[in-house]
Amino acid sequence: MTLEDTDYNNLKQRVQKYQETLQNTVNYRNLWQGELCQAIINQLKEAVSIVGLPGKIEHRREIQNLEAVVFSLGVGSSGLGEPVGDGLKRDLIKQNGSLVYQQLFNGKILVLINYPFIEKYGQPQPPKTIAIYRPEEIKTPFILRHLETFVTEVNNWEDYDDDAPEPNQRIGFKMNFETKDKA
């Protein structure tokens, strides 16, 4: 069985795409190191300063090319206390939530929200992924939108109650269309 050069076209295209993807990873990592990381930090600092949102910005560099920029609302006492005996209580610690810009293995940037959490009080919610971006896609208006989403999500967590209708019970959904007997 003999193959013609044209029989290799699909494979050639796939190899070319693979090589482009590998080069994109190098390019994305260079963009993060060269300008994007510091630009995210600067834009977060400016935005939270203007609106008066208290928090801390941290650049995590534990693993090269898996760095992260984290805007955290901090840690503190939850106001809840666990009795430990002899009239003593131990304050339960509360993580107040964070907005994270995390480099992925391929150089793209994962933006996610870590919800607030009180130790020993239920299980923490899983993080909410906002989006995954190529570095050149992250612009100042996106960072502002990410902060808006973050503050909305944290506020919803803080203001939790059962007054909101369940999604399946909203007006117009599962309405009773049974006909009444005319007898």
Image (cartoon, rainbow, N blue to C red):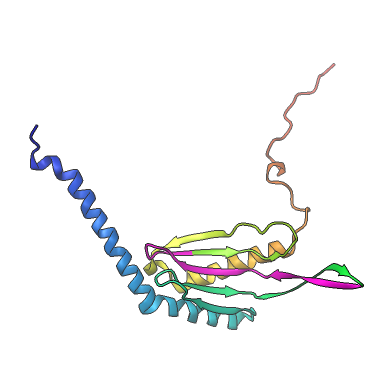
Number of labels in the image equals: 0
Q: Is residue 86 left or right of residue 24?
A: right
Q: Residue 139 colored magenta?
A: no
What residue do we see at 71% from left, 69% from top? 94
What residue do we see at 50% from left, 65% from top? 111
What residue do we see at 25% from left, 54% from top? 17
Residue 5 x, y percent position in the rendering: 9, 43
Quadrant position of residue 179: top right
Residue at the farthest top position: 183
What residue do we see at 69% from left, 57% from top? 123
Residue at the farthest right position: 87
Quadrant position of residue 151: bottom right
Q: Which residues are magenta?
A: 87-110
Residue 164 x, y percent position in the rendering: 74, 52
Toward the viewer: 150 or 63?
A: 63
Q: Is residue 97 left or right of residue 136?
A: right
Q: Is residue 143 left or right of residue 133?
A: right
Q: Is residue 91 above or below residue 159?
A: below
Q: Is residue 64 above or below residue 8?
A: below
Tell me the quadrant of the picture where the C terminus can be found.
top right
| Magenta: main secondary structure | strand
Quadrant position of residue 30: bottom left
Tell me the quadrant of the picture where the N terminus can be found.
top left
Toward the viewer: 60 or 51?
A: 60
Toward the viewer: 40 or 183?
A: 40
Residue 106 x, y percent position in the rendering: 37, 62
